[in-house]
Amino acid sequence: MSIKVYVPRDSSALSLGANDVAKAIAAESAKRNIPIKLIRNGSRGLFWLEPLVEVETEAGRVAYGPVDEMDVAGLFDADFLHGGAHRLNLGLTEEITWLKKQERLTFARVGITDPVSLEDYLAHDGYRGLKQALSIEPAGIVARVTDSGLRGRGGAAFPTGIKWKTVHGCVADQKYIVCNADEGDSGTYSDRMIMEGDPFVLIEGMTIAGLAVGATQGYIYLRSEYPHALETLNEAILNAYLAGYLGKDIQGSGKDFDLEVRRAAGAYVCGEETSLLESLEGKRGLVRFKPPLPAIEGLFGKPTVVNNVISFASVPIILDKGSVYYRDYGMGKSRGTLPIQLAGNIKHGGLVEKAFGITLRELLYDYGGGSASGRPIRAVQVGGPLGAYLPESQFDTPLDYEEFTKIWAVLGHGGIVAFDDTVDMAKMARYAFEFCAIESCGKCTPCRIGSTRGVEVMDKIIAGTDQAKSIALVRDLSDTMLNGSLCALGGMTPYPVLSAINHFAEDFGLQNKEQAA
């Protein structure tokens, strides 16, 4: 009987040589006449240990990592196919502390199954949520999602059930389900990991959404820089069609749902839902005025549900295990779990799925292991390039939407980028303005002009010219952008800029926070 060996096909693992390792394992097993079944799984998210090779033994799956192709012969010599001792042996994968302390709901299968095997998906509780959804009325599906407390995981944190209820209540000859998979925030990769590691959970979640609101067509608007996700999604979608989980008369229910992937335009602003819809219609990605909301007049003017990958991927477990099961995780109004992505100057970068309530300090040190440089972590940016910079004094803030609002910060997509004490926060504030200037769609003046003027003023501050006066001007610019921009790109650029000034005044030529006010 062939021994199962798992080598990730995740983009991060591939960039670290996973394909070479897989080829070397296949060649070595053939050379030694040892039959194996090589499975290309998703990543477990321990990126400092990639490529992470796993072997299925009688005791469970044993992990080895990080594995280089030059290590393969030695692994065979050490009898790694039976969990043999080796310097890269990490023990049973499920017992690795970093993984064991997580609450993996949305990522329950990622790194465990073959992403494009429908048989594997079904064997690990796949499509149980859809089965439940087909057994109840559409309004019942909406009620379960609403009662779960699920909020949009793309950044805005709008209650998912309310959005679905709005579309459900609209009368139209056509409705749409659109997945925002244009994951453009710095330090974020959870969407990609789902699409590459468990695409069926996204397909299932979107299908359930279609049943809930009466939509028969879905689109995944995929970031153009994700070629491996494109390949995996298309293969999984084809397999779902062949097995009757997509298309006409889904599983004999009389309900229809079609799904396809569309490549994104390569613009950060297209991550904003109305700009995304413009792009999806084949137009230039410009932000629309609201109202009307996309839930009422969205894609091609029809009622449209627009949610992020993680939002849709969270739906199947809610339908399968119930609203209460999901709602019991988390704190306050932040229910369920959040896939947190650790990046930047961090020793152990990777994906951590935890219930809301864990603190930044726990994430940075218990999971992240501190900075990669060994120097003190001075600042973290949470929520992508438009997120606030948080100082060490705020590291004990629990990850909760309302708690972050209290400190004028956002959780966003759950990306955390760490910086050690060598960072120049004035340059980081300048970068925020520059990023906005480059990525602005140009439709509104506060964003288009404000960001450009912001770069110019920041250059004066960095050069030491009229710093107090220039900082006052930056605050005026930020106020205009915050209150006058059409979308979050211009409206949230002040978050990183002002937080940098407020918390790191010394980098702006000021002696204390009072001078920065």
Image (cartoon, helix red, strand yellow):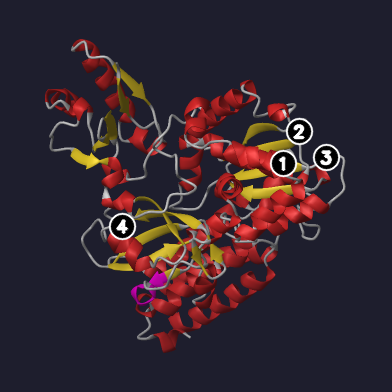
Q: Amino acid at mark 2?
A: Lys
- On the picture, is 38 further left or further right than 228? left
Given the image, on which type of amino acid does mark 4 rest? Tyr
- Residue at 40% across, 77% down: 503
Q: What is the span of residues highlighted in magenta in the rendered image?
A: 390-394
Mark 3: give few (<14), some (14-19) or many (20+) Cα within 10 Å: some
Q: Which residue, given by chain and number where applicable, does mark 4 sit on? A: 367
Residue 122 x, y percent position in the rendering: 52, 31
Q: Is label 3 or label 2 in front?
A: 2
Q: Which residue is mark 3?
A: 174
**Location of the N terminus (image quadrant):** top left
N-terminal label among 2 and 1: 1
Query: Mark 3 or 4 closer to N-term?
Result: 3
Q: Report how far apart the C-alphas of labels 2 and 1 lie in the structure.
A: 9 Å
Classify 10 Å Cα crowding around label 1: few (below 14), some (14-19), many (20 and above): many
Number of marks in the rendered image: 4
Query: Which of the pair 447/246 is nearer the observer?
Result: 246
- Observer-side mark, 2 or 4, equals 2
- Disc 2, SS: loop
**Mark 4 vs mark 1: which is more N-terminal?**
1
For marks 3 and 2, give the CA distance.
Answer: 14 Å
CB atoms at circles 3 and 4 under 8 Å apart?
A: no
Q: Which residue is mark 2?
A: 255
The relative height of residue 258 versus residue 453 in the rendered view (above or below) is: above
Give yes or no for residue 47 being in the magenta stretch.
no
Q: Check disc 1 and report its element: helix, strand or loop.
A: helix
Disc 2 to disc 4, how far (Cα)?
44 Å
Report the disc number at residue 210: 1
Amino acid, disc 3: Gln
Q: Is residue 279 visible?
A: no
Q: Are marks 2 and 1 in contact (CB under 8 Å)?
A: yes
